[in-house]
Image: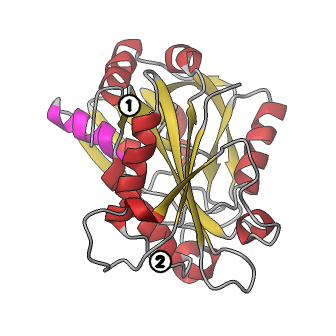
């Protein structure tokens, strides 16, 4: 049986003063039932989550993930997570991970329908083997996301900037990409601008400048993208955030999908047109992303 770990969290107020939150955690059998049939995370996808990569027992980019979890909770009118409590839960889960690559998931749900409190839990499990996409790359197709770049500001109730459990659209986009003979997808706004991939951020290279779509218009600010930018800046490259027209995609000198568990994956083709890759830089980025980072 594949190794797994699960920890239920009794959420506390974000301003609660204490140094040790161990008494608010309950380790449970990851293979046993743990959620009520009235749980809104499973009934409606009413909750938020984060996925944290773990390398040889070290959880990566924890602060950035916890801050984004809190931001998503705020957008969804969920109780704001106590960051120290959740950090200790992450550390507990990471301490149980054997050597190798693992993924920790943080889930905060609205709880049971008409219930008094949210439901919160943490899981840990082996990460999939992404050696092949990291080295050989992936082909992508562009797909219409169905809204324009101003939708997030105009209609905040769409929760376009939150990392919610409602991932049905993202999974449908991946299935559509595979129906079209590609490995992944890049979402476009319906007014013609590049957004993100269903489960990753996008980074483009033109010469010595790297750019990613500005984190508005419903784009999540990627934690791994931020780490890549830190590395590229230290190497002397220029990095930036832009409104990127879809017409700019084929002109890129290279492009990557980046995410917390898959790391940096080069794009080999967009809508059937081949795109140059940079194997040396890709290997460098993944070596950096596999190194311990807080």
Residue 203 can be seen, yes or no:
no
Circle nearer the N terminus (2, 1): 1
* Residue 218 visible in this rendered orientation of the protein: yes
Of the pair 48 and 178, the residue shown nearer to us: 48
Magenta residues, dominant SS class = helix
The image shows residue 250 at horizontal and vertical percentages of 54, 33
Disc ID at residue 57: 1
Which quadrant of the figure has residue 12?
bottom left
**Which quadrant holds residue 66?**
bottom left
Side of 158 relative to 12 (left or right): right
Q: Tell me how far mark 2 sits from mark 1, CA to CA.
A: 30 Å
Residue drawn 38% across the image and 23% down it: 286
Q: Give the residues in magenta.
A: 226-234
Residue linked to disc 2: 74
Any magenta on residue 1? no
Number of other residues with Cα within 10 Å of mark 2, as a class: few under 14, some 14 to 19, many 20 or more: some
């Amino acid at each position: 049986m594949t190794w797994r770990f699960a920890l239920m969290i009794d959420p506390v107020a974000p301003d609660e003063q204490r140094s040790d939150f161990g008494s608010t955690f309950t380790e449970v059998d990851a293979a046993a039932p743990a959620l009520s049939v009235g749980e809104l995370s499973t009934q409606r996808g009413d909750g938020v989550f984060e996925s944290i990569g773990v390398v040889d027992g070290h959880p990566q980019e924890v602060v950035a993930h916890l801050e984004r979890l809190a931001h998503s909770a705020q957008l969804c009118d969920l109780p704001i997570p106590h960051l120290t409590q959740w950090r200790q839960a992450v550390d507990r889960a990471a301490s149980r991970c054997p050597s190798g690559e693992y993924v920790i998931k943080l889930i905060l749900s609205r709880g049971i329908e008409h219930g008094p409190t949210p439901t919160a839990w943490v899981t840990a499990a082996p990460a999939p083997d992404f050696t092949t996409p990291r080295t050989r790359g992936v082909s992508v197709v562009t797909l219409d996301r169905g809204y324009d770049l101003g939708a997030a500001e105009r209609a905040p109730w769409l929760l376009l900037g939150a990392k919610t459990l409602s991932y049905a659209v993202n999974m449908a986009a991946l299935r559509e990409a595979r129906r079209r003979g590609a490995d992944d997808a890049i979402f476009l706004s319906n007014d013609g601008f590049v957004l993100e991939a269903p489960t990753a951020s996008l980074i483009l290279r033109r010469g010595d400048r790297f750019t990613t779509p500005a984190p508005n218009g419903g784009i999540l600010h990627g934690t791994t993208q931020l780490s890549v930018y830190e590395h590229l800046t230290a190497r002397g490259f220029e990095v930036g955030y832009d409104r990127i027209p879809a017409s700019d995609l084929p002109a890129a000198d290279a492009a990557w999908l980046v995410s917390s568990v898959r790391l940096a994956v080069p794009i080999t083709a967009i809508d059937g047109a081949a795109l140059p890759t940079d194997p040396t830089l890709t290997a460098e980025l993944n070596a950096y992303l596999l190194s311990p980072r807080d």
